[in-house]
Image (cartoon, rainbow, N blue to C red):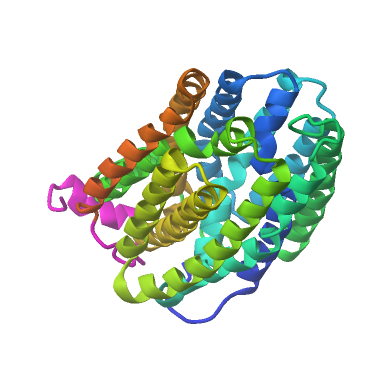
């Protein structure tokens, strides 16, 4: 096993960041308006929640197998091949004639998210523990910078000359451009990445899964609880904020795109600064700050009527996600040993997806019934998240293997 205690960035890290930047740009041309597109294809807010739930369910089913494959087969092959698969899903989204076919495209894309644990493990393997906070912040900043103007570009192109909420023909062209962008990224990943798993785990799959669950719960139980609450809060506001601004506040997609561009630029700067801070002051700082900013954003979104106030709400919401995301990724990378990262990361992700599978259709129904009042559910979940954060310990930066770490846990010596 390689030691990750040095300094600097690796070639793998650069390739992952560069390809993520390409993929995020093309994804952000359409992703903020995905819910509007489903509605334009004949769906409703309830259908939006249903489609999101199905997508989360498929991701949940494939995530643990993806984690086992990452630790047994390796990271590079899984990341490269499944990126090709995601590219093909964009073709389905581009040519979908109705919301049913579009949902099928989302399900196909969700299946190829099986690479998620391998991607996260490869990223963690390719950074050094002493500067991991800065490295993750740099990766988020570099990968997200090209996406700053993507929502604005997408929003401009999606303005319908007929006065409809969204231009369906332009949306199809944007999804096709996503196919081309993801195809290029897949080619780069296939030929430029190198494998980091030198010695795959010899532990049988079921035993590995049992060990991963034990470690995730007993060693990371408060971190896991924090994650679950964050996952609960997410769909009740982030799934419908753009729908709310366009349908209820009557903003155009161009206006919303401009606000999203501003928020993304602000989030990039802030996440970089937080990466430096959490290396010095601890990972919990960023986790808490991200939640507090999201709570401020939700409050402004509920109470605000002026466009400037609503724009500030979007900025706070995206700041919260960016800062919290960097901090959670760094915490997880610190707390899990290298050869088990794929599996443990997948278990944590599966719990999140299970929550979102249940919460998304509920959020859709409640939004269709009560409108923006549904955002208060996220606010309440975040209040509980802050309480749980007081129990989350700072992670130890681990180099030992999972079997060694489990010994005191099973013996009852590690609480």
Q: Image point 61% across, 41% down: which residue? A: 113
**Is residue 413 rendered magenta in the image?**
yes
Foreground pick, 258 / 128 = 258
Answer whether residue 112 is visible to the viewer in this image: yes
Q: Position of residue 7 (x, y in %)?
A: 49, 82
Foreground pick, 344 / 144 = 144
The vertical placement of 232 against 29, above or below, is above
Q: Position of residue 175 (x, y in %)?
A: 80, 40
Q: Image point 54% across, 26% down: which residue? A: 53
Q: Image point 64% across, 35% down: which residue? A: 250
Q: Image point 68% across, 31% down: which residue? A: 36
User: Is 413 placed left or right of 404 in the picture?
Assistant: left
The vertical placement of 361 against 110, above or below, is above
User: Is 237 placed left or right of 223 in the picture?
Assistant: right
Q: Residue 214: which quarter of the image?
A: top left
Answer whether residue 401 is visible to the viewer in this image: no
**Residue range (magenta):** 393-415
Q: Residue 195: which quarter of the image?
A: bottom right
The dominant secondary structure in magenta is loop
User: Is 396 placed left or right of 290 in the picture?
Assistant: left
The vertical placement of 352 against 287, above or below, is above
- Residue extending farthest to the bottom is 7
**Is residue 403 rendered magenta in the image?**
yes
Foreground pick, 11 / 18 = 18
Q: Position of residue 323 (x, y in %)?
A: 45, 60
User: Is 65 placed left or right of 95 in the picture?
Assistant: left
- Residue extending farthest to the front is 306
Q: Position of residue 402 (x, y in %)?
A: 34, 54
């Amino acid at each position: 096993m390689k030691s990750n205690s040095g300094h600097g960035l690796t070639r793998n890290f650069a390739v992952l960041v560069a390809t993520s930047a390409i993929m995020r740009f093309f994804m952000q041309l359409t992703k903020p308006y995905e819910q509007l597109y489903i509605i334009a294809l004949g769906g409703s807010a309830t259908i939006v929640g249903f489609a999101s739930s199905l997508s989360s369910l498929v991701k949940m089913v494939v995530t643990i197998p993806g984690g086992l494959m990452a630790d047994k087969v390796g990271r590079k092959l899984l990341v490269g091949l499944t990126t090709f698969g995601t590219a093909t899903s964009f073709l389905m989204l581009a040519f979908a004639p109705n919301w049913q076919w579009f949902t099928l495209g989302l399900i196909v894309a969700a299946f190829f998210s099986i690479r998620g644990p391998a991607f996260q493990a490869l990223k963690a393997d390719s950074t050094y523990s002493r500067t991991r906070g800065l490295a993750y912040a740099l990766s988020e900043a570099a990968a997200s910078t090209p996406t700053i103007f993507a929502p604005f570009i997408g929003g401009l192109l999606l303005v319908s000359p007929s006065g409809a909420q969204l231009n369906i023909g332009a949306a199809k062209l944007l999804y096709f451009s996503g196919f081309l962008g993801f195809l290029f990224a897949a080619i780069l990943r296939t030929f430029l990445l190198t494998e980091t798993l030198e010695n795959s785990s010899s532990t049988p799959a079921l035993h590995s899964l049992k060990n991963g669950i034990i470690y995730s719960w007993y060693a990371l139980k408060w971190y896991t609880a924090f994650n679950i609450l964050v996952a609960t809060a997410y769909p009740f506001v982030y799934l419908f904020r753009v729908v709310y601004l366009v349908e209820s506040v009557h903003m155009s997609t161009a206006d919303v795109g401009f606000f999203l561009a501003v928020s993304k630029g602000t989030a990039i700067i802030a996440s970089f600064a937080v990466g430096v801070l959490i290396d010095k002051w601890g990972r919990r700082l960023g986790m808490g700050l991200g939640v507090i900013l999201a709570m401020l954003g939700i409050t402004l979104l509920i109470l605000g009527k002026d466009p400037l106030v609503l724009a500030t709400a979007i900025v706070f919401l995206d700041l919260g996600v960016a800062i919290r995301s960097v901090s959670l990724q760094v915490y997880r990378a610190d707390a899990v040993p290298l050869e088990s990262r794929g599996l443990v990361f997948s278990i944590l992700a599966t719990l999140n997806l299970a929550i979102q599978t249940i919460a998304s259709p509920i959020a859709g129904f409640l939004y269709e019934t009560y409108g923006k009042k549904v955002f208060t559910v996220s606010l309440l979940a975040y209040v509980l998240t802050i309480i749980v954060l007081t129990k989350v310990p700072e992670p130890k930066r681990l180099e030992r293997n999972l079997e060694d770490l489990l010994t005191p846990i099973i013996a009852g010596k590690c609480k």
